[in-house]
């Protein structure tokens, strides 16, 4: 997607601080961290949001969730962490390329809404 910020990060056109990469997914540090550790995990294929997950493309989502514990362990998040995906306007999604936030490194607030 020519106009997608995260597709540009995948292409290397916009710099990022990578923490994990393989053939199908990329993880990098959020530019405006909300916690001591704040990492975004994205599929390399452009999927706009959770709403765009289908039977055809969901294997990459399973893969993301398989890798998330490895990233959390590498980051030393032994006390736990939160995984969040904002979908759509009411959730405040600002980048329309599916991404999962990994937040940790402190006691996180309990509010979910
Ligand atoms: P969301 O609001 O759930 O769509 O999350 C988008 C996230 O992308 C926000 O936490 C932003 O801080 C983050 N973000 C925006 N631009 C960049 C960038 N160039 N590099 C890393 N993270 C970014
Ligand atoms: Zn994209």
Image: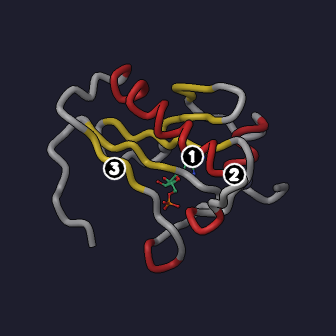
Distance between mark 1 and mark 3 Cα atoms:
23 Å
| Label pair 2/1, CB-CB below 8 angstroms | yes
Q: In front: 93, or 16?
A: 93
Above or below residue 103? Residue 46 is: below
Q: Which of marks 1 and 3 is in front?
A: 1
- Where, by quadrant of the figure, is residue 81 drawn? top left
Q: Does the residue labelled 3 lie within 8 Å of ligand 1?
A: yes
Question: Going by the image, does 73 lie left or right of 29?
Answer: left
Marked residue nearer the N-terminal end (2 or 3) = 3
Q: Residue at x 50, y 43 (%)?
A: 40
Q: Which residue carries the number 3 mark?
A: 34
Q: In front: 42, or 92?
A: 42
Q: Which residue carries the number 2 mark?
A: 57
Q: Is mark 2 within 8 Å of ligand 2?
A: no
Above or below residue 32? Residue 47 is: below
Residue 13, position as x, y percentages in the image:
78, 39
- Labelled disc at residue 61: 1
Give the secondary structure at mark 2. Answer: loop
Classify 10 Å Cα crowding around label 3: few (below 14), some (14-19), many (20 and above): few
Q: Residue at x 22, y 36 (%)?
A: 80
Distance between mark 2 and mark 1 Cα atoms:
8 Å
Q: Which of marks 2 and 3 is in front?
A: 2
Residue 23, position as x, y percentages in the image:
71, 28
Question: Going by the image, does 65 lie left or right of 49?
Answer: left
Which corner quadrant holds the C terminus?
Answer: bottom left
Marked residue nearer the N-terminal end (1 or 3) = 3
């Amino acid at each position: 997607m020519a106009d997608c910020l995260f597709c540009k990060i995948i292409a290397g056109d916009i710099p990022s601080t990578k923490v994990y990469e393989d053939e199908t997914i990329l993880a990098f540090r959020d530019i405006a961290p909300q916690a001591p550790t704040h990492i975004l995990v994205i599929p390399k294929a452009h999927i706009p949001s959770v709403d765009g997950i289908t039977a055809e493309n969901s294997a990459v989502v399973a893969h993301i969730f398989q890798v998330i514990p490895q990233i959390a362990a590498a980051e030393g998040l032994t006390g736990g962490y939160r995984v969040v995906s904002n979908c759509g306007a009411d959730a405040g999604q600002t980048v329309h390329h599916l991404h999962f936030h990994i937040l940790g490194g402190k006691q996180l607030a309990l509010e979910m809404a």
